[in-house]
Image: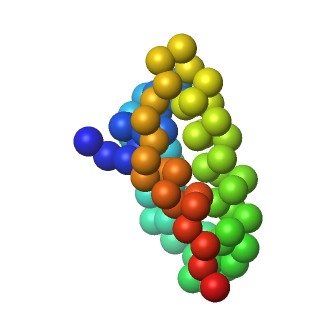
Amino acid sequence: MTLHSSQMAPSMRMKAGAPETEVRDRVLNPFLAHRLSDIASNHAEKKERRLRPVVARGRALATPVPQPILTAILETRHA
């Protein structure tokens, strides 16, 4: 079971595997330049913007979805 299928998909009401497929397709697209410095820039803001809403939706469900990995990622601060 992947992180997406166990912690993200239930709170986003998505099919497991959909975002992984989309990201893989984008990364493998030879027409897009993927520089590591671009990907890593604004990491803290990207984590908040992308993961905080997923965690909030998971907690708001009638049966809350446990999301220990996503919560730990959000709580981790990098220098």
Image quarter of the C terminus: bottom right
Instruction: State the residue in front, 7 or 31.
Output: 7
Q: Quadrant of residue 59?
A: top right
Q: Quadrant of residue 33?
A: bottom right
User: Residue, x 57% and y 82% (percent of image)?
Assistant: 36
Residue 31, above or below 75: below
Question: Where residue 21 sits in the image (x, y, percent)?
Answer: 43, 47
Numbered disc total? 0
Q: Is residue 39 left or right of residue 27?
A: right
Q: Is residue 20 left or right of residue 12?
A: left
Residue 62, above or below 51: above
Question: Where residue 73 sits in the image (x, y, percent)?
Answer: 52, 60
Image quarter of the N terminus: top left
Residue 52, above or below 8: below
Residue 5, above or below 26: above
User: Residue, x 43% and y 52% (percent of image)?
Assistant: 69
Residue closest to the far top:
62
Q: Is residue 18 left or right of residue 35?
A: left
Would residue 29 be visible to someone looking at this image? no
Would residue 28 be visible to someone looking at this image? yes
Question: Where residue 63 sits in the image (x, y, percent)?
Answer: 47, 18
User: Residue, x 58% and y 40% (percent of image)?
Assistant: 55
Instruction: State the residue in front, 42 or 79.
Output: 79
